[in-house]
Amino acid sequence: EALKASYTLPADSGTFKIPVILKNTDEALAIKSVTLGLRTVAGGDFAANLPLPLRTKKIIFSSRLERPDWWGYWESQLGDYGRIKHQLFLIASGTVDLVDMSKPDSYLQIPRTLYYIDNFRNFLKDPATWIARNPDKGYVLAKKTDGSNVYEFYAEAAPTKRFTLSYFAQVNGYFFIDESGKQIII
């Protein structure tokens, strides 16, 4: 929904919440991200003399996955970012984030993060075993009926969102395929 032309910070407050209501109806949001920028400006008896970075915020939104900040810390384990890789990570690991190494006590969460990454690695190598061990998640691995050696991985609850698992004879193995047509390997 459209924002108002301006908002007034209450006199007795140092914080203020602006309602941002997004409706997922624009199909372009599946292709690109949109940035909403907000900036505090002076007005009346309010002086906005803080440095610009402190009084400016941005919100990036879309209806697709965006590269999380923590990915950079774990890129040596996860490899280059890809949306399909990220989505498969979310499915396989059961977590939405990994430890942010910029935090002072982040070292305490490293074993947890390595556990999630290893679960993801095992999932990529053998999704059929992962499905067998996690029947409550409701995922299916179905061979395509076109005579190819290709499988589709999907949730029974959302059968239109499918991930491709292709066979590569050179290595005698199956690999998920990302949005660029490349094998997902970590």
Image (spheres, rainbow, N blue to C red):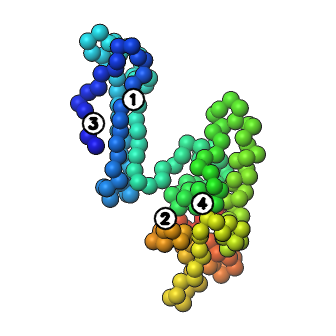
Q: What kind of residue is marked 4?
A: Ile
Q: Which of 79 and 146 lies nearest the eye of the viewer?
A: 146
C-beta proximity under 8 Å, tags 3 and 4: no
- Residue 3 badge: 3
The location of residue 131, given as percent across then percent down, is 66, 70
Q: Quadrant of the N terminus?
A: top left
The residue identified by callout 1 is 17
Element type where label 3 sits in the image: loop
Q: What kind of residue is marked 1?
A: Lys
Q: Nearer the viewer, mark 3 or mark 2?
A: 3
The location of residue 41, given as percent across then percent down, is 31, 20
How far apart are labels 1 and 4 at the CA level?
33 Å
Q: Earlier in the sequence, mark 1 or mark 2?
A: 1
The residue identified by callout 4 is 91
How far apart are labels 3 and 4 at the CA level?
35 Å
Q: Earlier in the sequence, mark 1 or mark 3?
A: 3
Residue at image x 33%, y 50%?
23
Which residue is the extreme one toward the left?
5
How far apart are labels 1 and 2 at the CA level?
37 Å
Q: Earlier in the sequence, mark 1 or mark 4?
A: 1
Q: Using residue 79 as the reference point, say whether residue 46 is left or right of it.
A: left
Q: Is residue 130 above or below residue 108?
A: below
Q: Using residue 160 as the reference point, say whether residue 6 is left or right of it.
A: left
The residue identified by callout 2 is 179
The location of residue 64, given as percent across then percent down, is 44, 55
